[in-house]
Amino acid sequence: MAVKIITDSASDIPQERAGELDIQVMPLTTVFGSEEFLDGVTLTNREFYEKLIETDELPHTSQLTPFQYREAFSRAAAGGDEVLYISLSSGLSGSCGSAVAAAAEFEGQVTVVDSLNVCIGQQLLVLYAVRLRDKGLSAAAIARELEARRGDVRVLALLDTLEYLKKGGRISPTVAFAGELLSIKPVVAVENGQVALVGKARGSKNGNNLLTRFVENSSGIDFDMPYALAYSGLDDTLLQKYIRDSEALYKGRAGELPICTVGSTIGTHVGPGAIAVAFFAASRKGTE
């Protein structure tokens, strides 16, 4: 009996990568005005940012429904396999609750794990689950390990603009104007399943330095576990600058750094030009 791993597109795992990992990524729906797109299926990340830059009205994403989960779980469990679903944070979406409701209909064959994270933080838990699956662990054993280690995942991001937080009503126009005038770069993190502002810096270089300090203060990176970097927008120029500025963190510890693009779930709120890092803090070790 195999373990089928399912997650959602908030994890920013591209469909082609999902095929390589032998997992399923359920696409969220991204809505621009009257147009609806399946995240990562009928709308690429590049197309999303092109549309985001061109529009004055913020898009939004729709959570997955219990019906969609029942359909996906039914297909995955049809051969008698166990199903493990890793959801984006219940603190950011109602999707996790819908998944739990749907899973209850499968008499223990489907296990749901709330990642308490999103974007590359959620992605790391999925990648860890794949490792554990490939070691032969059951869905229940994988779920226990993910729930034990999810608190060790750190996600930190440096934003290039306050414009999209303003558009989304997260900050006032006055605060956004003052911040842009002073070239304020906010640093945000995922804490207790929510996105929180944890620091501010003037200018990108100071922002990169602040991001590096936060990484160091988080007990450092466990390079034996999955880790990732990401950027939002149409190119990775700012991320490459951060990598150069923070070379001491990675040199001699990591080979080619895993880089992906921030998708629509978080990209809607942070806009282009954001950079993010996600890792397991080095202070604890899991079952590996």
Image: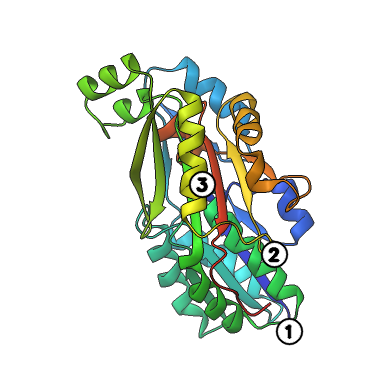
Coordinates of residue 73 in the picture (x, y in percent):
58, 69
- Three-letter amino acid code of the residue under disc 2: Asp
How many other residues sit within 10 Å of disc 3, few (<14), some (14-19) or many (≥20)? Answer: many
Compared with residue 181, is residue 213 higher up or lower down, i.e. above or below?
below
Q: Gap between marks 3 and 1, in whole Å?
A: 29 Å
Q: Are marks 2 and 3 in contact (CB under 8 Å)?
A: no
Q: Are marks 3 and 1 in contact (CB under 8 Å)?
A: no
Tag 1's secondary structure?
loop
Q: Is residue 184 left or right of residue 264?
A: left
Of 253 and 139, the residue lying toward us: 253
Where does label 1 land, which residue?
1
Q: Residue at x 59, y 33 (%)?
A: 242
- Three-letter amino acid code of the residue under disc 1: Met
Where does label 3 land, which residue?
28
User: In which quadrant of the rendered image does the N terminus lie?
Assistant: bottom right
Q: Residue at x 65, y 43 (%)?
A: 248
Q: Gap between marks 1 and 2, in whole Å?
A: 28 Å
- Three-letter amino acid code of the residue under disc 3: Leu
Q: Gap between marks 2 and 3, in whole Å?
A: 31 Å
Tag 2's secondary structure?
loop
Where does label 2 land, which residue?
224
Mark 3 or mark 1: which comes first in sequence?
Answer: 1
Q: Is residue 43 visible?
A: no
